[in-house]
Image (tube, rainbow, N blue to C red):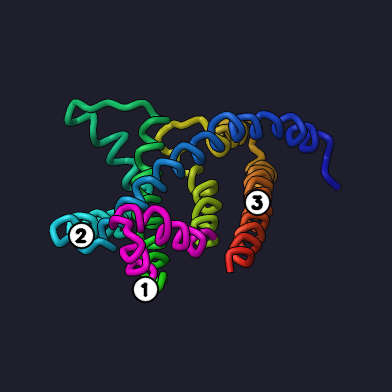
């Protein structure tokens, strides 16, 4: 049986952990993922267009970001840049790193989705008088994004959990709040389980939204056929 002291700590800490999640973790995820998707689409289109110099730049960016740990990237931006005279607050630093990091992974997802669209679709766009950009925007990209939706949704769920790393650069999100409560109460097991359950709650809501989105896209795709 859970003792009264531990029960009191858990009930008192729940809202103290949840509120930073709503005020910091969720906004950090939404802002970072939105910027990341812009980066991902641009990088994927550059690779798909096969412009040699730009493609090599995109591949280098993806190679570096995917090949280095997210935590190291956070430290480089927040602790490393001040040595060059560039000082950023914790939250903007986290947004930059999460956006750039997720943009690299998202670029590969979208690139693969673009390549899965039959090449005849591009030719069909030319046949009806569309330019390359019009064909990409109206025909190719919508189909590719529908294909990429499940993988991108999984990346979003993963990002919610990865935001816990922002505690290492003093972003006061859920995990850092939990660490402070643990330091005061000396109940690490119960409190870390509690914050884990809150992350699970957020991930579950996003999973439900993902499934709803997939059903809607499947219905839309069925009606288009």
Would you say the magenta stretch is mainly helix, strand or loop?
helix
Is residue 220 left or right of 103 when viewed as pictured? right
Mark 2 is surrounded, within 10 Å at the Cα level, by few (under 14), some (14 to 19) or many (20 or more) other residues, namely some
Q: Which residue is mark 1?
A: 120
**Residue beneath label 3, please?**
209
Image quadrant containing the C terminus:
bottom right
193 lies above or below 181: below
Q: Is residue 7 magenta?
A: no
Dividing the picture into quadrants, the one containing residue 58 is bottom left
Residue shown at 29% from the left, 55% from the top: 131
- Is residue 4 among what the camera can see? yes
Mark 1 and mark 3 lie on one chain; the one further toward the N terminus is 1
Q: Secondary structure at mark 2?
A: helix
Label drawn at residue 55: 2
Which SS class for mark 3?
Answer: helix
Side (left or right) of 14 relative to 163: right
Expressed as whole percent of the image width and height from the top left, the position of residue 107 reads 36, 57
Q: Position of residue 13 (x, y in %)?
A: 70, 32
Which residues, given as a range, are shown in magenta?
Answer: 121-149
């Amino acid at each position: 049986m859970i003792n009264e002291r531990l029960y009191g700590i858990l009930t008192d800490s729940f809202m103290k952990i949840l509120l930073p999640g709503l005020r910091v973790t969720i906004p950090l995820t939404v802002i970072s993922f939105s910027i990341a998707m812009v980066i991902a689409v641009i990088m994927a289109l550059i690779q798909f267009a096969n412009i040699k110099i730009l493609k090599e730049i995109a591949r280098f960016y993806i190679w570096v970001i995917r090949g280095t740990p997210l935590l190291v990237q956070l430290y480089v931006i927040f602790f490393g840049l001040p040595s060059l005279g560039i000082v950023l607050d914790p939250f903007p630093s986290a947004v930059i790193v999460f956006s750039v990091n997720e943009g690299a992974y998202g670029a590969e997802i979208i690139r693969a989705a673009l390549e899965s669209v039959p090449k005849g679709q591009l030719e069909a766009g030319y046949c009806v008088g569309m330019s390359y950009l019009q064909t990409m925007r109206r025909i190719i990209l919508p189909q590719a994004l529908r294909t990429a939706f499940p993988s991108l949704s999984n990346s979003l769920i993963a990002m919610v959990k990865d935001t816990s790393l922002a505690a290492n650069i003093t972003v006061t999100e859920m995990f850092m709040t939990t660490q402070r409560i643990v330091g005061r109460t000396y109940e690490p097991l119960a409190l870390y389980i509690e914050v884990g359950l809150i992350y699970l709650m957020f991930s579950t809501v996003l999973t439900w939204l993902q499934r709803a989105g997939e059903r809607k896209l499947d219905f839309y795709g069925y009606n288009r056929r």
